[in-house]
Image (cartoon, rainbow, N blue to C red):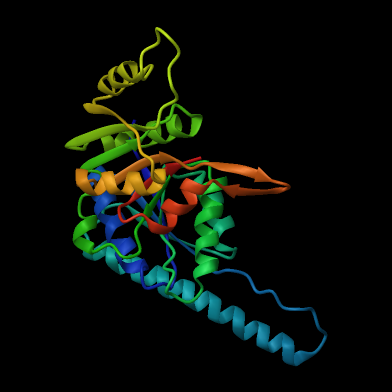
Amino acid sequence: MSYRSILLYLDQSPTCDARTRAAIRLARRLDCHLAGLAPTGLLDLPGSPGATLSDLAALAWDSLRDEAERAADRFRDACVAGGLRSAETVIDEAEPAASLIAHAHCSDLTVLTQADPSAPGHRGARAVVEQVLLYSARPTLLLPHACSPQALEKIGSKAIVAWDESCEAVRALNDALPLLQQASAVEVVRWNPPRPAAGEPAVPRLDALRQWLAWHGVAADMRVETTSIDVADALLSHAADFGADLIVMGAYGHSRWTERVLGGVTRQLIGSATVPLLMSH
């Protein structure tokens, strides 16, 4: 398994340049295509026969297009400077989340950045991340908003896999294989496993999982951890102790009436993780 195409979100945020550099390095390392997607967003103006409102709408729409074009131009320049052999830009007249979800169908991995809580438009930026995690058919690589460029040099050189035998965890682990195969160290960690029945092994199937990873060229250590603190906090603390530059985990969600929302651990990590997260739902 390998990544042949990566989708990168382009916008006007201060984190876009660092995200672009990280994606270019990743695409160059994996020898794959990089597509920069610049959604324009959509105008939400009331209809009116008046010429004044129509003219203002035209000006606002031109401004949205110009911003997307500038983001695309910066991406093209960065690809040339970074020596990337295969890249393209796409300007899409759509809302960011819907555009990313649709274009992800023809990519292997989508690259986003955490919403910066101190930046204007934080809630909208976070909503984009949450919608992509919940509805995209592809894995998402979420970069920390405060991460230094040096810290993103080798995403996945030391990786932690958060494991609980769920479908989401299995999918995330499978989706992360191209990165895990290049890692110098991989640790699979299970937090607070259920108490086994009499005669059962303490952690069933971890040996089988280690063998499956070995068949795919990944040498992994298996750990079982218990904690009385929040699992998200425990995972981030362990990642810091391990020196991890990637956490692989399932993106969990649940239904609330007719609205799908992310689970508590997932929501906490996408807001506070200090290392890149590769997540699948």
Residue 79: where, in percent of width, then height? 28, 62
Left or right: where 197 falls relative to 162:
right
Give the answer, above or below, for where 183 lies relative to 92: above
Q: In the displayed image of the protein, which residue is found farthest to the top? A: 199
Q: Is residue 136 left or right of residue 226?
A: right
Res. 119 in view? yes
Q: Residue furthest left?
A: 184
Q: Name the residue rendered at 37%, 17% in the picture.
A: 205
Residue 43 drawn above or below residue 225:
below
Residue visible at 25% across and 21% down? 214
Q: As drawn, which residue projects farthest toward the right?
A: 49
Compared to 222, does 109 lie above or below? below
Pinpoint residue 192: horizontal percent, then vertical percent. Answer: 40, 32
Location of residue 100 in the rendering, given as x and y in whole percent from the top left corner: 52, 54
Residue 211 percent coordinates (x, y): 28, 17
Image quadrant where residue 31 sits: top left
Q: Is residue 72 above or below residue 264?
A: below
In this view, the residue in front, 261 or 85, is 261
Q: Nearer the viewer, residue 182 or 166?
A: 166
Q: Which quadrant holds the N terminus?
A: top left
Task: Residue at 24%, 56% (x, y): give it.
Answer: 152
Total labels: the figure holds 0
Q: Is residue 210 left or right of residue 198?
A: left
Q: Residue at x 40, y 43 (%)?
A: 231
Residue 39: in sight, yes or no?
no
